[in-house]
Image (cartoon, helix red, strand yellow):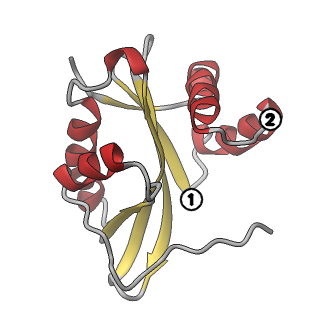
Amino acid sequence: MSAALHLAKPDDLERVLALVTAFHAEEGLDSTDEARRAALLPLLEGIPHGCAYLIGPARAPLGYVVITFGWSLEFGGMDAFVDEIYIRPAVRGRGIATEVLISLPKALSKAGVKALHLEVDRENEIAQRLYARAGFKLRDRYVLMSRAL
């Protein structure tokens, strides 16, 4: 099974939106279709703050990953955040997410990204093992904190 990445474009909106909706339902994330569409469309239209990739065949994707960009003095320049990664339940456990999370940093580093971050539920040991296999490490001194505006 191929974890090829395809940069999602506006024509892919409905495919990506269906995957995002499935992920949000699975994770119990409270969001509306309108809010998801409004957050996703600028990424597909080329806003410089992030991008979305379809995973697998573009016409029948196996999942998606959304990357957002920022700037870090600590890491010496542009950094990126895996905002969401989702693989359809029927194809999980086949190494697709691992392949994506190993290949993505290589591509991003060629574009000048100095660090790639992600967050994971403290109780989700399966995801933590996946991320560790892909080279992500816990930062013991740091806790991600958020404030919705």
Dot 1: few (<14), some (14–19), or many (≥20) neighbours within 10 Å? few
Where residue 30 sits in the image (x, y, percent)?
74, 42
The image quarter in which residue 122 lies: bottom left
Q: Residue at x 61, y 51 (%)?
A: 47
Q: Label 1, on which residue?
A: 49
Where residue 127 sits in the image (x, y, percent)?
34, 46
The image quarter in which residue 16 lies: top right
Please, is residue 76 above or below residue 108 in the view? below
Badge 2 element = loop
The N terminus appears in which quarter of the rendering?
A: top left
Q: Between residues 38 and 9, which one lies in front from this camera angle?
A: 38
| Comes first in the chain, label 2 or label 1 | 2
Apparent side of residue 136 relative to residue 79 in the rendered image (left or right): left
Q: Which residue is drawn at 67% across and 42% down?
A: 29
The disc label shown at residue 138, or none: none
Apparent side of residue 103 relative to residue 40 in the rendered image (left or right): left
